[in-house]
Amino acid sequence: MRKMILRWELVGIVVIILAGSALHFVFEWTHYWRPAVVVAAVNESTWEHLLGFWPGLLFALVEYLFIRKAAHNFWVAKSLGLLAMPKWW
């Protein structure tokens, strides 16, 4: 069980970093399509420092489906991690 949780967390690190980094370029990739502003970076604002938060939240939702029986206090741990993430990103 512990190896399964560790594997999910390590995969999550990679997925969150790649997805958060990709979100930095989505606005440009969509040729400045205005609705993309909701999830993509436009300039170096406070909102854009949350680019790791949204992929992290989405990954946590998917991860929970697979490890909910193995991980106790999953949402407490994930909530604390997601709240700390913008400060370290």
Image (spheres, rainbow, N blue to C red):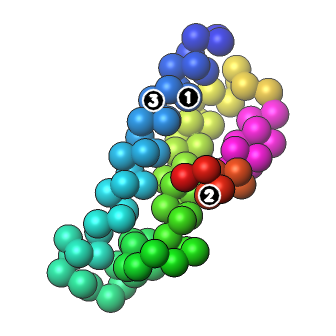
Q: Is residue 5 visible?
A: yes
Q: Position of residue 89 (x, y in %)?
A: 55, 52
Choose top left, top right, bottom left or bottom right for residue 38.
bottom left
Q: Position of residue 51 (x, y in %)?
A: 49, 61
Q: Residues within 10 Å of mark 3 (few under 14, many from 20)?
A: few
Residue pictured at 79% horizontal, 27% vertical: 72
Mark 1 or 2, which is nearer the eye? Answer: 2
Is residue 49 placed above or below 15 in the rendered structure?
Answer: below
Q: Which residue is mark 3?
A: 11
From the viewer's side, name the closer residue of 69 and 55. Answer: 55
Residue pictured at 42% horizontal, 36% vertical: 14
Question: Which of the labelled discs sits on residue 27, or is there none?
Answer: none
Q: Is residue 74 magenta?
A: yes
Is residue 69 placed above or below 44 in the rendered structure?
Answer: above
Three-letter code, disc 3: Val
Question: Which of the labelled discs sits on residue 86, or is there none?
Answer: 2
Q: Which residue is mark 1?
A: 9
Q: Are marks 1 and 3 in contact (CB under 8 Å)?
A: yes
Q: Which residues are magenta?
A: 73-82
